[in-house]
Amino acid sequence: MSRMSRRLVGVLTTALLVQGVAAVTPATAVTDKAVASDWTHGTGQQAAATHRVTLVTGDRVDLAGEGVAIEPGPGRESVGFQQFERGGHQYVVPNDALRMVAGGQVDERLFDVTGLVAAGYDDARTAVLPTIVTYADAALGGRSLRAADGAQVIRTFPAVDGAAVAVAKDSAGAFWDGVTAGSRTTGLRTATGIAKVWLDGKRQISLDRSVPQIGAPTAWQAGYDGTGVTVAVLDTGVDATHPDLAGRIKEAVNFTDASDTDDTVGHGTHVASTVAGGGAKYKGVAPGASLLIGKVCPDRSCPDSAILAGMEWAAPRAQVVSMSLGGDDTPGEDVLEEAVNTLTAQTGALFVLAAGNDGSADGSVDSPSTADAALSVGAVDKQDVMASFSSRGPRVDGAVKPEITAPGVDIVAARAAHAGSDYVEVEPGYTSVSGTSMATPHVAGAAALLAGQHPTWQAAELKAALMAAATPTPGANVNAQGAGRVDVARAVHQSILATPTALPLGTQEAPADDDIPVVRTVTYRNEGAEPVTLDFGARVTAPDGSAAPAGMFTASPERATVPAGGSTTVTVTADTRVQSATGVFEGALVGADAATGVSVRVPLTITKATPTHKLTVKVIDRAGNPAASYWTDIMNLDGSTYRFVYDPSGSGTVSLPAGRYTVDASVITPTDGSTTLLARPTLTVTGDTEIVLDARTATPVSATLPRKDASLRLAAVGFRRTLTNGTGFGIRATADSFDKLFTAAVGDDVGPGEGALVADVRGFWAKKGADGTYNDSPYEYVLVWFERGHLPTNFSRVVRQSELAEVKQQYYSVTPGAPARAFQHNFGFPPEGGSALSAGAIWFDTPGSGRTLYYKADDTMWETRYNQYAADGTFQTQFWSKDYETFKPGKRYTVTWQKAVPGPRFGRLTFVTRDVNRLSFNMPMAGDQAGHTGYSLYDRSRVAFYYGDQKLVELNYPWTDASGTVPAAESTYRLEYSAERSAANGGFGLGTSISGSWTFRSGEAAGGRTPVGLSAFDFAPVVDRTNTGRASVLPVRLVRQPGAAASAVRSVSVEVSYDDGGSWRKVRLVRVGRDAWVVPLPGSGRPKGGAYVSVRASAGFADGGAVEYRVIRGYRVG
């Protein structure tokens, strides 16, 4: 798995799988079953807006979609940066952190800008960066933290020898200096006593017929209902008033920043009642058990520090700890995995953890269920068929995870009184939810039943008994189900435990002829009063699903008696020398007694590897020394194999199957602070291979302007590699001077059938002021050059003014008479797509007299983000280019920003589309006269979508988009929007209320995203920079959504108001073109200087569609 492409923010381990960080409000009563209840908001304003993120180093990064702008922290202006693009995430790593990130001493998630925004750690939402610091030397590490400015220890965690540390963002640079002092040469461990600095990341929270399905009533009848056993549920809290939980809760503690333990999500209450619901309507698995409730998730996201605190509290108090939450597993042991293993060893508590809902891809199982001591739970449906969403193993090192399954599809259990509206009530007090979150409490409850039966048993015995008694799902492999579906009826009646509980036999490297057979022993212990005789056999399937060849797997002895209170051992041998296919062989060692029904399963796997070869990569810096600070990627051209190579010696070796690979490296030379990019687009591996990436072979990169008063702000060089399967990844290095950037093309260019490589060189120039900053520079040069197939060699350009496009920027006021401050980010993309880079913000007054941008004019696709703030620093508006723009050399252009009248404008990011039967929309409401997509600070906003009269989804501020399934048949839909903003909140004088709706008909649409037939009103008064004009005539037109089928206008009406909508006057329209009119405004009662014109309009179309639009204070009258 790619180190840089993994999903670093976990998902709710329920199958609701809501995107983003807040839930939509679905209709409370969905009546048409042809309409799926899968409507969710997408990325909307939260992802569309430019987000500022302060890194742990004190540097600031603005994230704007695929664009990144970097602003070094105070005193760090000469520090270069690495921008990585992996798996749709943008990472920005300062050069002085690269070695520690590559070496595993600093969590790379601290530099995953996309992930930090998704976790809510951008600057707009928090002034601190939450971290977890683990110690190599607790005394020295503690002193380092105390000495570091801006660090506040929130909690300590003995289980992981660490602490939760809140880093004040305005002191992040000082914190970084404090905890990394001297570490560039000696490493964190030696210099500061700190083992690692982690992001305090966020995991996300992932019963009628299901309880009998696992055999719980049989256990009850045998006298085991969990009485005397305590189960801790670490989740979103609980509704303690629910009848099913009355008298069940011993204690509830809140470990979050929420005000109490009440469950305002609904997840924790559902889980708790599944474990131990008392049966007011539905019984839980262990209705006699007592519950400890630890609230570790204030919403759907669960901070690692809160989880750790809850775990340390629960483990000494409970025999079983149920956690239906998780996030990506990574190589090595993360802090939650470490805590599971440590606390299990210290207390004997069994941690039962959800495997995750990441689907059927191998290796998708979530941490911390991947901890050795955890019991990792997958999900099946009520027919014992594997749930499609249930995450699959193995663990990254090949270990068997998940280890057991349980019912997790359409599970009905208690609904919290204050649950989110996505926990729809299926009957009073109950809701139906799916996910491995729902499977996990079934297993936790089963463990409680066994703990009640065997009071002296601890985690190892409980886990062994549950796995040994599991019932396998036919056709499901071990990586999906582990031992099989939990069968507590069998578990309480059979007395045999097996150790180990699973047999991951590893990988046998090719060639197989000289393989040494793998031999393991399994010990069977009889906890009962009678001897048990079992027949043993290895039931294993080959990679194609057929039975493994005879003789490949054997068990000895084939029959043995396990004495009462005693044990016996069985030897399993896997001989991969037997002629067979390569791939994963999986199954189980089964000990069974057909007469009594006893069956003891120990899942096993072994991989018979395809032939591999050793690839050694040696990296040398520009001083001729083995590189210590570098980053190397190796990826198969079809995207199937990724390896990250780093060794502080400068030489690393990996094993790879034969194939074609792309290899790149970014090398920092400490003696001069330079960065060298080297890329070998294609390397064919057919045997053991060694390559040398020598930064001394690289050549400098340079670009100069003829303009003498222009200073270089930022230089950058990078590339994006696109593989044959369409996967893309990229790397870019920045510096404050081209003198610090070097490139080397290694080997041949990208050839036919080898994907693509697009390299870029970027330079940003402006006029430096007397204060040493570039603020208020009247111009900017934003230049980018692309080369294809290779990294550039000896790149040098002297720019001529005739090569450039001159684009004058004119800015308009959102509050006439009130100045504001603004900045723009300008991103140049190649036609092939990918990521882009912009220099840090240049602030300027607006409306002002405007500025001039000079662009490299060719096939570069330019996107601009304009951001405006009130004089007091409050965010006001942001505008995006309507679409990517290209310019011609020597030409002059003029672009206006925020020109009245505001309202929805169709563009690349504003749309209503349909793909087959999935309808999607995004409707930001503050676009401008030039057609730019516009976002704004609002007091409140609402977007609602209807199928006929049935509301499918409703979004409140700041969300503006959603998608979901609709009926195939042509039907009528309505999209409503409204927003309000005020002088009190952001200083707004224009567009204080914007509202409207679209009605349209739509049927099944094939062939990708098809625009729906909508038109928007575009009022275009002649106004000055303060958005002040004359109240005489008002041009208006209807603009069709690009790509939508045309439809004739059947009716159109416009009204104006001079008293902010208190009264309206219908006006005459004079047609001046197709779907274009001029509106003569009424003379009587015209507003005088300082007043405003409001507009209201409606139109109907031949295709049955309609549009309504209203804006209060559209523009001011002079």
Image (cartoon, helix red, strand yellow):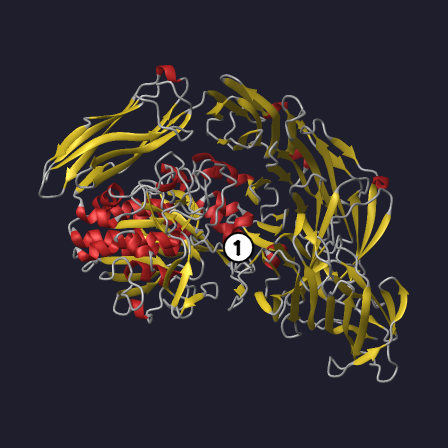
* Residue 625 rendering spot, x and y as whole percentages: 53, 24
Quick check: 337 above or below 1061?
A: above
Binning the other alpha carbons within 10 Å of mark 1 as few (below 14), some (14 to 19) or many (20 upward) gives: some
The answer, for residue 772, to whether it is visible in the render is: no
Mark 1 sits on what residue?
Answer: 19
Query: Along the line of sight, which residue is nearer the eye, 858 or 1004?
Result: 1004
In the image, residue 573 sits, relative to residue 829, either above or below, namely above
State the image quarter where residue 78 is shown: top right
Which one is nearer the viewer's eye here, 1065 or 895?
1065
Q: Position of residue 940 (x, y in %)?
A: 60, 71
- The location of residue 609, given as percent across then percent down, is 42, 24
Q: Position of residue 480 (x, y in %)?
A: 39, 40
Could you tell whether 761 is left or right of 290 in the image? right
Q: Residue at x 74, y 48 (%)?
A: 884
Q: How many marks?
A: 1
Q: What kind of element bears circle 1?
A: loop
Residue 250 lies in quadrant: bottom left
As drawn, is 32 to the left or to the right of 419?
right
Q: Is residue 897 above or below residue 633?
A: below
Q: Is residue 889 visible?
A: yes
